[in-house]
Image (spheres, rainbow, N blue to C red):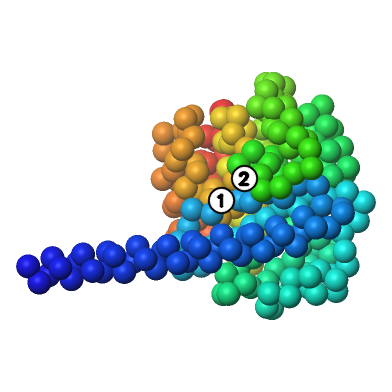
């Protein structure tokens, strides 16, 4: 009876702690939206839902700010976020990182006109997505709209829901070409016994292998942090793909030569899609 009571108390304690953390996160987001939405340049603010636990190393609050004209300088932004600590800016002044009550926050600023042009060009040829893939569309579709001056994002989402086969085939071809390029680099690194270049090339190879799979399934690519778990949600995946991928990325005593052979098997499975 005592053990059962202790278990109940522990569950209540955990539930209360989760509730407190969620309230802190909600309050943090509200503070940021209040500040950013007051800028005349701000058009739309979206929040990427983070399903991970607050104590997970991958956890952070991620907001996209679509703006017109020009955003305030880094100095003025730091002053505006008076409640934040450890303010940092990067990416040519287009990304901010800081902490609010120990909650990690990342803001990314996206010029509306440039992004709109990029969106329209992508829908026409997908050439503008040759290097970046479809992750930006994933963020547009999966985020929660917190503030908007117009229905621009709502309309953009409607366009993204009706992409034709030509678009997805071009995305798949681009990712496959990059995959083959990185496989060549992996092979060269193995021949040279260059472990550093192998590691760099292997990362590009895996990213584009996944890119082909997502395009073949007509699904936008998620964040690299979510690639592995989202792969299991895809409807069309080669039978032995998951096992081969895990063998390739696993850190163990497998030789580089064997890793290259596994990469070759992965590439063959992907080329058949």
Q: Identify which residue is drawn at 68% across, 74% down.
A: 84
Answer above or below: position of 21 versus 176. below
Q: Secondary structure at mark 1?
A: loop
Q: Position of residue 259 (x, y in %)?
A: 51, 54
Q: Nearer the viewer, residue 201 or 234?
A: 234
Q: Position of residue 236 (x, y in %)?
A: 49, 29
Residue 141 circle label: none
Q: Is residue 116 left or right of residue 2?
A: right
Q: Residues within 10 Å of mark 1 (few under 14, many from 20)?
A: some
Residue 144 circle label: 2
> Do the residues bearing badges 2 and 1 touch, measured as CB atoms within 8 Å?
yes
Identify the image quadrant of the C terminus.
top right
- Residue 62 seen in the figure: yes
Q: Identify which residue is drawn at 84% across, 65% down.
A: 93
For disc 1, the marked residue is 49
Q: Identify which residue is drawn at 68% across, 23% down.
A: 162
- Residue 132 seen in the figure: no
Q: Position of residue 62 (x, y in %)?
A: 64, 57
Answer above or below: position of 57 versus 203. below
Q: Nearer the viewer, residue 261 or 24?
A: 24
State how far apart marks 2 and 1 are (Cα).
7 Å
Q: Identify which residue is drawn at 58% across, 74% down.
A: 101
Identify the image quadrant of the N terminus.
bottom left
Quarter-wise, where is residue 9 in the image?
Answer: bottom left
Q: Position of residue 230 (x, y in %)?
A: 50, 43
Q: Secondary structure at mark 2?
A: strand
Q: Nearer the viewer, residue 200 or 142?
A: 142
Q: Residues within 10 Å of mark 2 (few under 14, many from 20)?
A: some
Q: Is residue 245 left or right of residue 7?
A: right
């Amino acid at each position: 009876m005592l053990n059962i009571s202790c278990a109940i108390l522990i569950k209540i304690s955990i539930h209360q702690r989760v509730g407190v953390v969620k309230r802190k996160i909600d309050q943090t987001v509200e503070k940021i939206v209040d500040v950013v939405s007051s800028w005349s340049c701000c058009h739309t603010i979206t929040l990427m839902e983070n399903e991970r636990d607050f104590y997970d190393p991958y956890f952070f609050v991620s907001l996209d700010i679509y703006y017109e004209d020009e955003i305030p300088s880094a100095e003025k932004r730091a002053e505006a976020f008076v409640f934040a600590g450890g303010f940092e800016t990067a990416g040519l002044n287009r990304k901010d990182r800081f902490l609010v009550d120990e909650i990690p926050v990342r803001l990314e600023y996206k010029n509306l006109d440039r992004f709109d042009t990029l969106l329209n060009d992508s829908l026409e040829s997908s050439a503008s997505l040759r290097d970046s893939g479809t992750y930006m569309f994933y963020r547009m579709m999966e985020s929660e709209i917190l503030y908007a001056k117009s229905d621009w994002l709502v309309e953009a989402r409607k366009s993204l829901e009706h992409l034709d086969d030509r678009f997805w085939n071009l995305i798949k071809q681009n990712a496959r070409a990059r995959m083959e390029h990185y496989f060549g680099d992996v092979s060269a690194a193995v021949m040279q016994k260059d472990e550093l270049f192998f590691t760099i090339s292997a990362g590009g190879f895996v990213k584009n292998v996944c890119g082909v799979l997502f395009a073949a399934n007509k699904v936008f690519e998620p964040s690299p942090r979510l690639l592995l778990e989202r792969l299991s949600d895809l409807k069309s995946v080669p039978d032995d793909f998951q096992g081969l991928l895990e063998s390739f990325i696993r850190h163990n005593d497998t030789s580089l030569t064997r890793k290259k052979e596994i990469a070759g098997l992965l590439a063959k499975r992907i080329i058949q899609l």
